[in-house]
Image: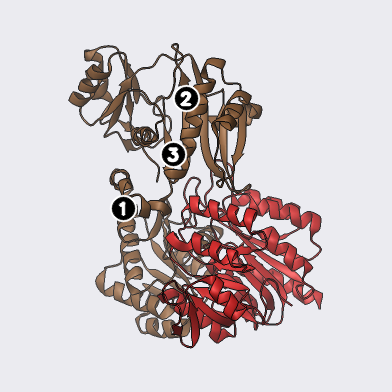
Chain colours: A red, B brown
Amino acid sequence: MSIFVDSNTKVIVQGLTGGQGRFHGLRNRDYGTKVVGGVTPGKGGTDVEGIPIFDTVEEAVVATGATASFVVVPPRFAAEAVIEAAKAGIAFVVCITEFIPAQDEARMYNTLRRNYPGTRLLGPNCPGVISPGQSNIGITSGDIALAGGPVGIVSRSGTLTYQALYDLSQKGVGQTTCVGIGGDPVPGTNFIDCLAAFEADPETKAVIMIGEIGGAEEERAAEFIKEKMTKPVVAYIAGVTAPPGKKMGHAGAIISGSQGTAQAKMKALQEAGVTVAKNPTEAAELMVEIVSKLK
Amino acid sequence: MDLFEYQGKQFFAQYGIPTSPGGVADTVDEVVAIAERVGYPAVIKAQVQVGGRGKAGGIKIANNLQEAKMYGDSILGMDIKGHLVKRVWVEHASDIEQEYYASFTLDRSAKLHLAMVSAKGGVDIEEVAATDPDAIIRYHVNPLDGITIAEARDVVARAGIDEPAIEGVSEILVKLYDAFVKGDADLVEINPLILTPDHKVHALDAKVTLDDAASFRHPEWEQYRATQEYDGREKLAKERGLNYIGLDGNVGIIANGAGLAMSTLDVVNQVGGQAANFLDLGGGADANTMTSALEVINTDHNVKSVLINIFGGITRCDLIANGIIEALSRVELKAPLVIRLDGTNAQEARKIIEPFVSDKLIIRPTMLDAARTAVSIANGGDVK
């Protein structure tokens, strides 16, 4: 089992004819993901290496039966693209676009919440989701993941997600699903959504959660873990040494006043019974220990 | 991007938010000319992006031409906490009956916009939030709906704003929301928002942070960008399109991805070192990006070693390796490089670097090993 996507998930790529869309869309297909179509307005009827292109998401859905979309379009068009997918009935949208204006992102999020509650958005500004051996939607390199579980991963950072996947795989511990929720201020899917899904997934036995400075999502996740989770969680929080008032790369990674520090997040997680690691490698090592005891 | 006060006031003016009549001056003559025009008493305010300028003597009230000249002269060129005052804002000093507070930001938890209004303005709002939280009224606005004048009136009345100011503050709150949304701001804040004895309401200060991601639809922001102040290192990094933040330590950091870069800073700290900077190459970095990064780090005289921490996803390690070798031929590096490469094409990358390995170019197998070596070198110890 896995969460959000599996081997049957049919995916369209919005922006498949662009440089990035083509590269990652084809890479996802090579991994085994069912990439059934692409959408680029004005290019309907053409194809990218045998993948049919449609003018609209609606046409693509009617023709292919896709239920997921991978949005790889520039920031100024991304919010509209996500909403178009939701309108067409797509249930799961992965948007990797970075630098979407915050006002657009807030409108996008609230439009989905109010008008299309059946659509889950992952991202924006995220690496996507991979259920190893089944489906990979996004920009994660498939070869660093290992199929078979039992670990679920949820992370706000792209490269730290890869680091965690790689460390676990190197040690022979597989993953059920690895979800990158992204570093933006208003992510469509948050830690709690993923933790709840992992808790409900019978094949996931333990979870690695990777957070970073800024916002209060990790603290809220800690509350959720304390109250609702039975599976062990190992966490790592990046940015212990980050200075206040400076955006650390991600739009969402900023300490303002006493809000959003790594220390506060680590404390909240520890109090919720989470094993907190000092660095990503230690997180993997701690997880290997936990997994060995499960068997 | 944080605006200076005078830019914030100009920004507000575009959305019809009233401010005191005034102008910007770079010279004493201009200070005097503006003071004469707006009338005395005139307040002269240093334009720096740092708190505590009043206490530092950067805000003065001139009652006549001589004083305008004297204060203009003393404030221009003043150093406030390391910020040189190159520009002042001069405006007619307002008579103040009451001081309020109003702002809009995005509430990340609620995923809605958040208005904050308080009758306790003119002081640090974080302090009010800590000592008297009930004095601040918080009101969520859904970006799909916006805020109506009736809703604004209700919020303003609940905040305990004085009767004669309710209409004025409410109108400004609606305009402030407009400025926040249409102006693509991350934060708009008026503190203080004042009521004058003749019962008029206007903004006495302006704090505005613009969302850089929205630059593409605001060509007019170029004027703001031209006045931004960066330290020398940050300026060069900006020109090269690198995501860089200068820090105080002596281990230079280059990583790909914000999370990994942040994590690298932490690990350096854990093994007893201090990072000289945060530098995220971003996704898909290549030889040029790497060369630029090394050039920027090379301008930092505090740097005693450079830790390059790459996990290839979209980024190909072989391209990074080529960039490192190319940079070595282009730039005379002052500090040894300690490199850790994993992920996409890491093996090829190590092969590219191996012939060049020396005590100035060191490869380590893991992030922790690399951090230990870099910190040891920076601290004047052996190459571990």
Residue A79 or B39: which is nearer the viewer?
A79
Q: Position of residue A88 (x, y in %)?
A: 59, 67
Element marked by disc 1: helix
Give me the chain letter of mark 1.
B
Q: Amino acid at mark 3?
A: Ala
Q: Position of residue B226 (x, y in %)?
A: 28, 46
- Could one spot residue A144 in this view of the protein? no
Element marked by disc 2: strand
- Separation (CA) of disc 1 from disc 2: 34 Å
- Could one spot residue B179 in this view of the protein? yes
Location of residue B3 by image quarter = top left
Instruction: Write down the residue under mark 2.
Output: B193
Q: Position of residue B208 (x, y in %)?
A: 42, 39
Numbered disc in front, either 1 or 2? 2
Residue at horizontal 35 percent and vertical 49 percent from the top: B218
Numbered disc in front, either 3 or 1? 3
Give me the chain letter of mark 3.
B
Residue at horizontal 43 percent and vertical 49 percent from the top: B211
Disc on res. B235: 1
Position above or below: A27 against A231: below
Give me the chain letter of mark 2.
B
Have a look at marks 3 and 1 and say if they share a chain: yes
For the residues labelled 3 and 1, say whether their Cβ atoms are less than 8 Å apart: no
Disc on res. B179: 3
Q: Earlier in the sequence, mark 2 or mark 3?
A: 3
Task: Report whether B94 appears left or right of A35.
Answer: left
Q: Amino acid at mark 1?
A: Lys
**Mark 3: few/some/many CA within 10 Å (<14, 14-19, 20+):** many
- Separation (CA) of disc 2 from disc 3: 16 Å
